[in-house]
Amino acid sequence: MKDRYWVLFSAMALMFLGVTMVFSASGIYAERELQSSFYFLKKELLWVTLGSLTLFVAYIFPLKSLQALAPLIFLSVLGLVLLTHTPLGVKVGGAKRWLGLGFSTLQPSEFMKIALVILLAAYFDWVPKAAGYFWRGVAFPLVLAGLAILPVLTQPDLGTAIMMSAVTFLILFVSGVRLRYLLGLAISGLPILFYCIVQFPYRLRRIFTFLDPWKDPQGSGFQIVQSFLAIGKGGLSGVGLGESTQKLFYLPEAHTDFIFSILAEELGFVGSVSVILTFVIFTVAAFRVTLHAADRFTHLCGVGCCSMISLQALFNIAVVTGTVPTKGIPLPFISFGGSNMIMNLMVVGILLNISKYSEKSKEELKRKKVISSKTITKPEWRNPVTEKFRIA
């Protein structure tokens, strides 16, 4: 089966599981707080519908046009991110990351991730030899990444900023930037990360909570401890779909960032490993699509799209299992959230488009080679009558 079908089927499987788990994790909470157990389910189905339309548009949209529009897309999304710092921004939990749409909210930083990937891929395709030089291959791409990351970081949203930084690093690496430049970049980024953590006391508390969450199980360690309890209750096969007890107002963010904990409780070790394997299948198939990309732009764009989803899944699962400090990163295709769902399905559409474009380009190349071969090897046809008079 073609790699793009594996990408599509694994993404759809995760999405349908996500819809089920969102209803399971949020139904009781929605019934009590919003007087409708279907509140979050109906919203999630709306996002899935809009995301599916976005997937289709991304699949049929010409990739060359996408590359040409890369600067315009980037500036447009950057403008939306900057709007969150104005009175139009919606503040939730101390962070202004959303724009109000009346019936819902939009998180522009989710779309900034894909806009940055498209711009960097287009840049390295337009300037193919840039990777061999510091100013053109490292400094200028970092300026572009900084324009995207700094407004997100000041929302504040450290998790998304870290994800964007990691994807930028991978694109630079795949582009052929010299390893000494990348090593220097990684080392110089550590003091910046340290400053971003110690500057905000709540982030520093998360570090201490990560080191010993049981020191304050009713305070700063409450969320991660409840996550541990949910995962532990699941055992091998889980307590059954819809039978979680931790979602009964014990585990905060049960249907968003910590939905994997509820999944582990209800579906157990078997269900958790199945989800992880599905993400692995998606990652392998997506990277195989990028390996067969037709040109530099589609190759780098595919790498950025694939790593964006894969790293986000890895980071989310690492957070809920206590492997890294707590940070608000949703689980792709599964966590409740409109902007993230639409962005993820858009990425899937781009990957499918890259695969389709690559196959079409290879077929055209083969056809040209066959025509060229026939033109060279086939003797020229000559009219025997005119040839006779020519000889005479």
Image (cartoon, rainbow, N blue to C red):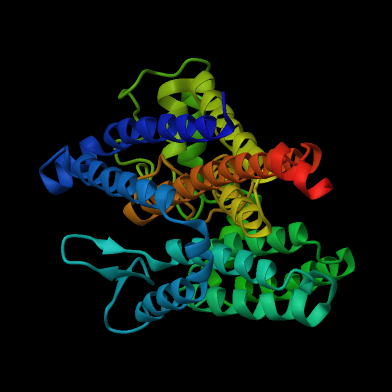
In the rendered view, would you say 215 is above or below 82?
above
**Residue at the spot x=72%, y=41% of the render?**
382
**Residue toward you, 149 or 131:** 131
**Residue at the spot x=22%, y=60% of the render?**
104
Judge from the rendering whether residue 274 lies leftward or rightward of residue 287; answer left or right.
Answer: left
Residue 264 location (% of width, % of height): 47, 28
**Quarter that holds the N terminus:** top right
Residue 218 visible somewhere in the drawing: no
Residue 160 location (% of width, % of height): 52, 62
Residue found farthest to the left: 35
**Residue toward you, 227 or 114:** 114
Residue 71 location (% of width, % of height): 51, 76
Judge from the rendering whether residue 377 lies leftward or rightward of residue 153; answer left or right.
Answer: right
**Residue at the spot x=47%, y=24% of the render?**
233
In the rendered view, would you say 86 is above or below 52?
below
Judge from the rendering whether residue 103 lies leftward or rightward of residue 223; answer left or right.
Answer: left
Residue found farthest to the right: 180
Residue 227 visible somewhere in the drawing: yes
Q: Quadrant of residue 107?
A: bottom left
